[in-house]
């Protein structure tokens, strides 16, 4: 069973998306996860290029730009994880970031959501 589904709505910006996906893959150690990229009608082929560079991602292509929330909703319909994580495509992640969130949620089943510390 997949423990975590990471959903990234995306519209253009190849470098942003590649950096985000790369940081996810490098910094998740102990979780069984799937990575879902929802392409909101990108015109720069960035999502298709991401699928080539990162073949393990699940690429969902929308026939219109659904925006961030619409992309999250579409991605969640395809998610198989116990937990859903919604990310912007311009985020970079540090070691154990998913493990910390999952650990918190497992220890606090009454919690409906968790958010990591965000640094700008």
Image (spheres, grey):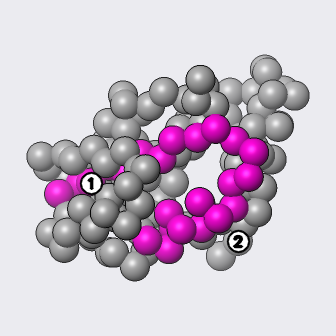
Decide if residue 95 is on the left or right side of residue 76: right
Residue 57: give x, y in percent of width and height: 41, 50
Q: Residues within 10 Å of mark 2 (few under 14, many from 20)?
A: few
In this view, 83 is above or below 18: above
- Separation of marks 2 and 1 at Cα, in angstroms: 26 Å
Disc number placed over residue 119 in the picture, else none: 2
Tell me the quarter of the image containing the C terminus: bottom right
Disc number placed over residue 82 in the picture, else none: none
Residue that protrudes farthest toward the right in the picture: 107
Asked if the magenta segment contains residue 64, the reply would be no
In this view, 32 is above or below 57: above
Residue 74: give x, y in percent of width and height: 32, 36
Decide if residue 119 is on the left or right side of residue 103: left
Disc 1: which residue: 39
Number of numbered discs: 2
Going 19% across and 46% down the picture, which residue do you hit? Answer: 62
In terms of secondary structure, where does tag 1 sit? strand
Decide if residue 66 is on the left or right side of residue 30: left
In terms of secondary structure, where does tag 2 sit? loop
Q: Is residue 73 visible?
A: no
Q: Nearer the viewer, residue 58 or 44?
A: 58
Residue 93: give x, y in percent of width and height: 65, 65
Tell me the quarter of the image containing the N terminus: top right
Q: Which residues are magenta?
A: 18-41
Decide if residue 103 is on the left or right side of residue 80: right
Q: Which of the 4 image quarters holds residue 111?
A: top right
Asked if the magenta segment contains residue 34, the reply would be yes
> Marks 2 and 1: which is nearer the front?
1
């Amino acid at each position: 069973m997949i423990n975590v589904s990471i959903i990234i709505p995306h519209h253009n910006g190849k470098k942003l998306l590649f950096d985000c996906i790369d940081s996810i893959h490098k910094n998740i150690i102990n979780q069984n996860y799937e990575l879902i990229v929802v392409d909101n009608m990108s015109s720069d082929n960035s999502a298709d290029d991401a699928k080539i560079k990162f073949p393990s991602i699940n690429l969902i292509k929308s026939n219109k730009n659904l925006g961030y929330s619409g992309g999250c909703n579409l991605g969640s319909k395809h998610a198989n994880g116990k937990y859903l994580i919604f990310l912007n495509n311009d985020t970079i992640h540090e070691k154990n970031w998913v493990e910390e969130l999952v650990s918190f949620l497992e220890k606090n089943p009454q919690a409906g959501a968790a958010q990591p510390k965000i640094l700008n």
